[in-house]
Image (tube, rainbow, N blue to C red):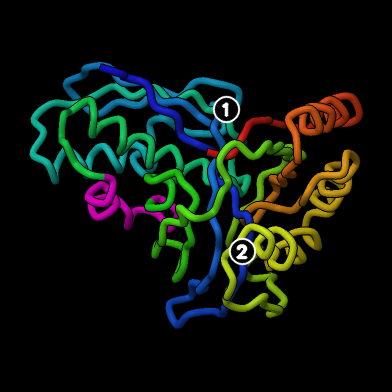
Amino acid sequence: MNNIETAYAKINLALHILGQRDDGYHDIDTIFAFMDDGDTLSVKHSDTIELDIIGPFASALDCDAQDNLITKVALRLREHCNVNHGVRITLTKNLPIASGIGGGSADAAAAARLLNRYWELNKSLAELCAIVGDLGADIAACIYSQTCRGEGIGSDIMLLDNLLTKDIPILLVNPNIAVSTGPIFSAWDGQSGGEMVTLDMQSIMHHYGNDMERAAVALFPQISEVINALQHDNPIISRMSGSGATCFAIYDTLSDRDNAKAYIEEHHQHWWCMSGKLK
């Protein structure tokens, strides 16, 4: 049995805010895509639910906190599926915290997929979404970890098998700052790209955008610096993901992406970056 699962980094290829809801949340229209790399989770037997966190960004998380999404997923699955034993989960935290690439949601989703296999629950991805999806707005999309449209608060998803995103070279860059989503939504200027009407890659990459980018740049000017640096090697597009501060660039070729990464690593050594391909 494979006891390792990847928590794939989430990217918002486009993100439009449609308005604020009565419950304080915002309705959005977004296109999620996923990189072929991210955090990793592994499991082994335990009598209780335990979580260890290692890796470059481990110090920013509390593995003893009961409000950790991984722990919540494990407890929810064990109760819902009448599992009578525990598990020890080890998270290798490779993705920066509060960075707009779904780290916490991706970790929770990976835990759901991994425990489904380890505990032999035999649940479909749709069933996993029904059981744990309400724990976070992005968890359902991250459970599938494939290109999809997110509506409502992001939890209403529609898979987009027709979008040919697989194997597109991508580079993620973060200026090593953490950005909380709430303040960015609060600073949103009310300008909306509106509902996305045409769901083809040309429209998504060239006619849509990220409505949160202006607010995030106003609060964290370093984001603009990252986007400008990503434009050095003429990507197809470069923009911010989610509420920031991680930005991404998409390239025609792997060599273009690798040249861009080399430029970032040479000129901005204090920034975090990860290269890969879209799933």
- In the rendered structure, the answer to whether residue 31 lies left or right of residue 267 reads left
Q: Is-magenta flag for residue 129? A: yes
Q: Position of residue 82 (x, y in %)?
A: 8, 39
Q: Residue at x 72, y 68 (%)?
A: 207
Estimate the spatial distance between the alpha carbons at disc 1 and disc 2, rounded to whole Å.
24 Å
Q: Nearer the viewer, residue 136 or 127?
A: 127
The secondary element bearing badge 1 is classed as loop
Residue 94 — which label?
Answer: 1
Q: Is the magenta stretch mostly helix, strand or loop?
A: helix
**Camera-nearest label, 1 or 2:** 2
Examine the rendered structure and indicate whether residue 162 appears above or below residue 209: above
Q: Which residue is drawn at 29% across and 26% down?
A: 50
The secondary element bearing badge 2 is classed as strand
Residue 30 — which label?
Answer: none
Q: Is-magenta flag for residue 97? A: no
Examine the rendered structure and indicate whether residue 26 appears above or below residue 70: below
Q: Which amino acid does label 1 sit on?
A: Asn
Among the 4 quarters of the image, the one containing residue 130: bottom left
- In the rendered structure, the answer to whether residue 234 lies left or right of residue 59 reads right
Quadrant including the N terminus: top left
Q: Which amino acid does label 2 sit on?
A: Leu
Q: Position of residue 152 (x, y in %)?
A: 44, 71
Q: Nearer the viewer, residue 112 or 219?
A: 112
Mark 1 packing: few (<14 Cα in 10 Å), some, or many (20+)?
Answer: some
Q: Residue at x 91, y 29 (%)?
A: 267
- The outermost residue toward the bottom is 22
Q: Which of 64 and 245 is in front in this view?
A: 245
Which of pointers 1 and 2 lies earlier in the amino acid sequence? 2
Q: Where is residue 99 in the image (x, y as percent from the top left)?
A: 63, 45
Give the labeled residue for mark 2: 15
The magenta-colored residue range is: 125-139
